[in-house]
Image (tube, helix red, strand yellow):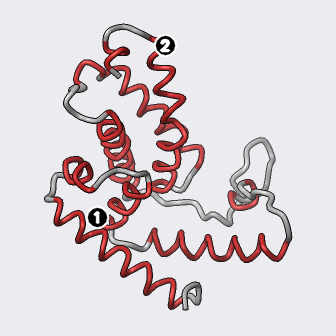
Amino acid sequence: MVAFQQGDHAAFEQLLLRHQKAVTRFVLRFVSDRELARDLVQEVFTRVIDKRASFSRRARFTTWLYTIARNLCIDHHRRMKFRRHASLDAPRGKDGDERTLKERMKIEQPGPDEQADNKRIGERIERAVQNLPPEQREVLLLREQGVAFDEIAGMVGVSINTVKSRMRYALEHLKKALEAEGVMP
């Protein structure tokens, strides 16, 4: 990031290549829509360009980057709070494509039984994650991306003990939800 701040545009390309996939996964878990996630990730990196002068060399770049992504996701949720959301089962294609979002996102995997099991388990896990209180889901998703507890505390503006507590409660809620769904014994 320091090289990019000093005018090395190739350094930005390296940052983009290194972090784009992880940030996309992070944002996608917040918004659950691939197109929207792509748009938000593009905005994240646009802000990296625009705000590069505000990056402090004392901070870790990933903490700063995920803070930008998190804030954009929160802003999006605030804007969408009162809007109606389309069903995943409703046709959402463009130009006459009548497939649902679920149908368009299918990933081929070997073996139909394994694919069905993985899909069912994945849906249950994703539903359990989405049903977590927002503060717990946020900590869980950041930890999933490898962000340290102390960095999350700085990003979210709470103590490290609060972050650890939210993580513990998130894991407990997930365990109970997945046990109730029959995913865990």
Q: Amino acid at mark 1?
A: Glu
* Mark count: 2
Instruction: Using residue 117 as the reference point, say whether residue 111 is left or right of it.
Output: right
Give percent across and percent down for residue 32: 53, 56
Q: CA distance from mark 2 to mark 1?
A: 36 Å
Q: Which residue is mark 1?
A: 135
Q: Residue 10 got which mark?
A: 2
Residue at (43% x, 29% y) in the render: 45
Kind of residue at disc 2: Ala
Q: Residue at x 29, y 23 (%)?
A: 51
Mark 2, mark 1: which one is toward the viewer? 2
User: Looking at this view, is 158 or 78 the one in front?
Assistant: 158
Q: Residue at x 36, y 7 (%)?
A: 7
Near-viewer residue (179 or 99):
179
Q: Position of residue 114 (x, y in %)?
A: 78, 73
Q: Answer above or below: position of 42 versus 182.
A: above
Q: Nearer the viewer, residue 25 or 37?
A: 25
Disc 1 element: helix
In which quadrant will I find the N terminus?
top left
